[in-house]
Structure formats: C-alpha cells, structure tokens
Image (tube, coloured by chain):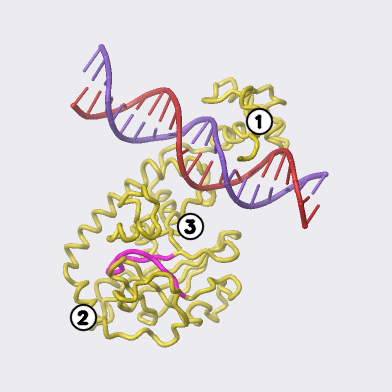
Chain colours: A yellow, B purple, C red
Amino acid sequence: MGRAPCCDKANVKRGPWSPEEDAKLKSYIEDHGTGGNWIALPQKIGLKRCGKSCRLRWLNYLRPNIKHGGFSEEEDNIICSLYVNIGSRWSIIAAQLPGRTDNDIKNYWNTKLKKKLLGKQRKEQHAHARRVGGLKQEIKRESEDLMLPVGVISRTPCWPHEQNSWPIPVANACLQYYDLNNKTSSIVHIPDNTVTATMNSQYSSFDISLTQDQLYPSTGNMITTDTCHTSNVFQGFGNFSSDFACVNSQQMDGSELVFYGMESMEIANGSTNTNSTESTSWGDIISSMVYPPLVSHYEACQQRIMPQDVTFEESSYFAMRTQ
DNA sequence: AACACCTCCAACCGCCTTCGT
DNA sequence: AACGAAGGCGGTTGGAGGTGT
C-alpha cells in the first residue's frame, strides 16, 4: 500500500491548464504569495486543482523570469558537465542555470542533449579507434611487469577480475571534491604516474588506488577524513586508453568526491609527455568530461549492474554514475 | 488525403525528506 | 521520539503537433 493521495482525485481537474486557471493562480500568488501551503491554495482561489499541480504549474511555467527553450552552447556544457559529475539531480543542475526549471532541463536532456552528446561521442570514438589502432595491446603486454605503487592501502574486493587485470600509470589525475550543500568544489592535482589504474580486460573496468596523502592532502583542502570515502579504491568502467576516465564517489555527508584521469602513454613509448596527455588545462579536462568513454563490453556490465532495458549507448552514462 | 510513426514537453505519479505538533 | 502532513524531487506518461510514406 502506498500513501494516501494528497487530494480527492475524483473532484479535481487534471490535464492542461486553461488561460483562465493560469491567470487566477498567477494573480493570487502575485498578490498574496503561496501562504506556505500549496494544498490549501486551490480552495482559496476557487480552482478545482490539486495543490501539487498548482505548485508545479507555478514553478515550471507561471513564476517570473522563466526561460523556455533555446538553450545556449554554454548552458549545454554546464548541463553535461554537471550530469557527468552528479547524475540526474535536476534541481541542483537547475540551480546553476538562472531562469531554467528542473523539468525543462530534464526534458531537454532526455530529448535532445543526450542524443547530441552520443552523436559526438561516437564520432570521437571512431576517430580515436583509427588513431590508436593496436596500441592498447602493446600497452597491455609491456605493462604486465609493472608493480602497483608503494602506499596502496587497500583494494575493494568487489569484482573477481584478478585473472585478467594489469596496472597502468595514470596521467593528469586529479580529485575534485563537491560540497553540494554549499555548492562549492575544490580540485587537487595528483603528480603524473604516482597513481595507477588496475585495468580489467574482461569487463573493461578499472580500480584506482589512492594513498592517504593523495586522498587527504595537507594543503588546507576541503577534503577531510570524516567526509571522505571509507575506502581508498575507486571503481569504474570504460576504456581508459587516451580517453578521459571519471569515477564518482558519494560521501557520507552527501557531498561527492570525483576522480579524473587519463591513461599515461609513457610505458608504451618511453617518453613522459605524449599524445594522450597533451591536454593539461582544467578547461580541457572539463570539456573532456562531457565525452565519457564508451563501455565496450556491454554484456559483462549488464550482467553485473545494468538495468535490463538499458541500451548500449545509454550504458556509458550509466557506467559513469556507478559507484 | 490518410495513416503511421516520431518528437517534444507539460503534467502526473509516487517515493523520500522535511517540518510541525 | 513519533507521527502525519506537506513539500520536493526524479521518473514516467500521454497527447499535441510534426514528419514521412
């Protein structure tokens, strides 16, 4: 049994709002405010509507300074970046875009932006596949002898992929801490190749192990021991090579810790600054974030965590949100 | 012209959280 | 502390309008 309905459904009007209803609601709220009680509001105005319906109509359509449609490129980027980082928390995303409602952004994402992004992503993936070719096989062969760095504290014994895993140094790694209450974030850059991703060929997954120093820097950063993840191991999906990887981790206090990084090409060709690490500015990193790596072994992922009806294309977004 | 299919978005639903008593 | 009411939120739906055949 669910909870009782908030109003008598037999006696309330449903469906699209008429201009008369809009005018009544708008004029009343502009004159008297909501009175802090949406449920009682329709009775006061003489509307045969559910209080929740009035609230929604006001918030999404009638209140002043609402913008509809015509999302700019900048707004697209903000939405994409936030979606990659915090998922479908539309109210938080909407709070970053003045005049936009969570409903509008949600609809825009579901109908247009997601498709636009997937189109771009496929293009990038195609170009990348041509560029890199068989490099990944070479990386795997040459890196099998590498040791995990000293200071790795623990591993999360989640997935049985020890049989098919190998460690890869990570470049351009950084941790971003989101304080969702204060809407602030801070970034800590981690020196190249001091962190290693343990790749799993079978499931296209990876673990990132971090030392205490990396996770809790003594630089006056916002990350503190009581807000951080209990484990020092982050886990994610995707082909790391040359793409950008990102792993979210929900914290105990509701804030989030996000790891970003690229696979370093150092082990493949012996130099320290090559094609995979050429983008080093945070602006580049942020723009990379909106093109998350595709999950190449979809079936394996689906078996473990995917909803049964998710499509191959959607799986990349799902993977980004999995922690 | 008629029909099928697709896209978009306003509105609804129900769960979870917050607030007041 | 416990409870119920209301608010807030994200997922989903239904229908209007557009497009293709």
Q: Position of residue A221 (x, y in %)?
A: 55, 74
Q: Amino acid at mark 2?
A: Asn
Q: Chain of mark 3?
A: A
Q: Chain of mark 1?
A: A
- From mark 3 to mark 2, how far is it between C-alphas? 36 Å
B18 vs A45: above or below = below
Closer to the camera in the image, A276 or A239: A239
The image quarter in which residue A319 lies: bottom left
Closer to the camera in the image, A25 or A281: A25
Q: Which residue is denoted by mark 1 in the rendering?
A: A7
Q: Which residue is denoted by mark 3 in the rendering?
A: A86
Closer to the camera in the image, A58 or A146: A146
3 or 1: tag closer to the N-terminus: 1
- From mark 3 to mark 1, how far is it between C-alphas? 33 Å
Q: Nearer the viewer, mark 1 or mark 2?
A: 1
Q: Chain of mark 2?
A: A
Dominant secondary structure of the magenta stretch? strand
The answer to whether marks 3 and 1 mark residues whose Cβ atoms lie closer than 8 Å is: no
* Span of residues in magenta: A233-247
**Residue drawn at the location 30% of the way across and 77% of the way down:** A166
Position of C11 with respect to A202 (left or right) is right
- Assess disc 2: are there few (<14), some (14-19) or many (≥20) residues with their C-alpha within 10 Å of its C-alpha: few
Q: Which residue is denoted by mark 2 in the rendering?
A: A269
